[in-house]
Image (cartoon, rainbow, N blue to C red):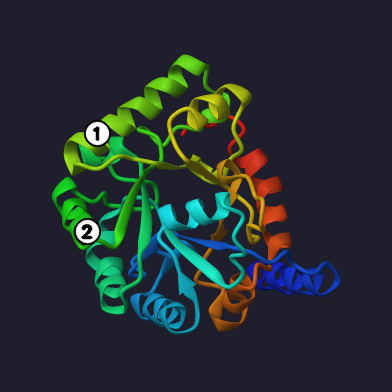
Amino acid sequence: MDLLPNVVKLTAGAVDVVRRPVEGLVVLIYHRVGGRTPVRVDLPTAAFDEQIGLLAERRVVLAMDDAITRLRAGDDLRGAVVVTFDDGTADFVDEAMPVLVRHGVPATLYVATGHIEDQRDFPDDGRPAGWAGLRDCVDTGLVTIGSHTHRHALLDRLPAQRVAEELDRSIDLIGSRLGVTARHFAYPKALRPSADADAEVRSRFVSAAVAGTRANPVGADPFRLARTPVQTTDGKRWFARKLAGGMGFEDDLRRLMNRRRYAGASS
């Protein structure tokens, strides 16, 4: 049994007692549903169903467009939640979507369009969705499609021209294949952008998501939208803490590790 995740979560929970979390809009990140792989972001379908059911019953779940409009207007969004997914793996269509439809919960899916277009697997046995399946998801009226770059590129280490190419190719494919405009963006690996990347993203989208594991308070910058990852190790206890905007210390540790982990990576 890997004790490290539990130790980190217990520590993060203790930090929340000392440093009370900020209240506001909570944006959840899901990656995979189905429990096919051992990665900590691949939730069993039953666990995902339970969480989405809880959100539908006890929270105000907003579509991303509505959330950003209200955030910009200065609304108090305490208790509100946005559900998001990254990448565009096939399990979003096959496993997650039926659950979202059953509970009537909207979600935003940030797709790395190169993987979809070329049917190239994501890391950790992530089979990509197809455009036809994603069109079916959009047709439910519950799914907003956003950009996650074209090649899942880490924009903080690319020159401005390459950043523009990544974003424009992604936007064009989402428009031509799905018939929708990509208005929202999520940085791959949730890494903060360079100044060039930030400028290119702000010129094309109405919001951009980074890391955070905290709530977005009144006045938060929609181009620094903090998101909270949901993991198999959360269980009911830590999931509830995350819905309250807590567990930020877990993200502090993750950022330190990712700084080393992705030091030489490009995607």
Q: In this view, does 29 lie above or below 56?
A: above
Toward which corner of the image does residue 161 lie, by quadrant?
Answer: top left
Residue carrying label 2: 137
Q: Position of residue 36 (x, y in %)?
A: 33, 66
Q: Which residue is drawn at 22% across and 58% down?
A: 137
Q: Residue at x 51, y 67 (%)?
A: 81
Which amino acid lies under the numbered mark 2 shown in the image of this protein? Cys
Residue carrying label 1: 173
Q: Position of residue 203 (x, y in %)?
A: 48, 27
Q: Which of marks 1 and 2 is nearer the N terminus?
A: 2
125 or 92, which lies in front? 92
Which amino acid lies under the numbered mark 1 shown in the image of this protein? Leu
Q: Are marks 1 and 2 in contact (CB under 8 Å)?
A: no
Badge 1: residue crowd in 10 Å (few <14, some 14–19, many ≥20): many
Q: Where is residue 6 in the image (x, y as percent from the top left)?
A: 66, 73
Tell me, for residue 88, which label it has, or none: none
Quadrant where the N terminus sits is bottom right
Whether residue 12 sits left or right of residue 227 in the image: it is right
198 or 152, which lies in front? 198
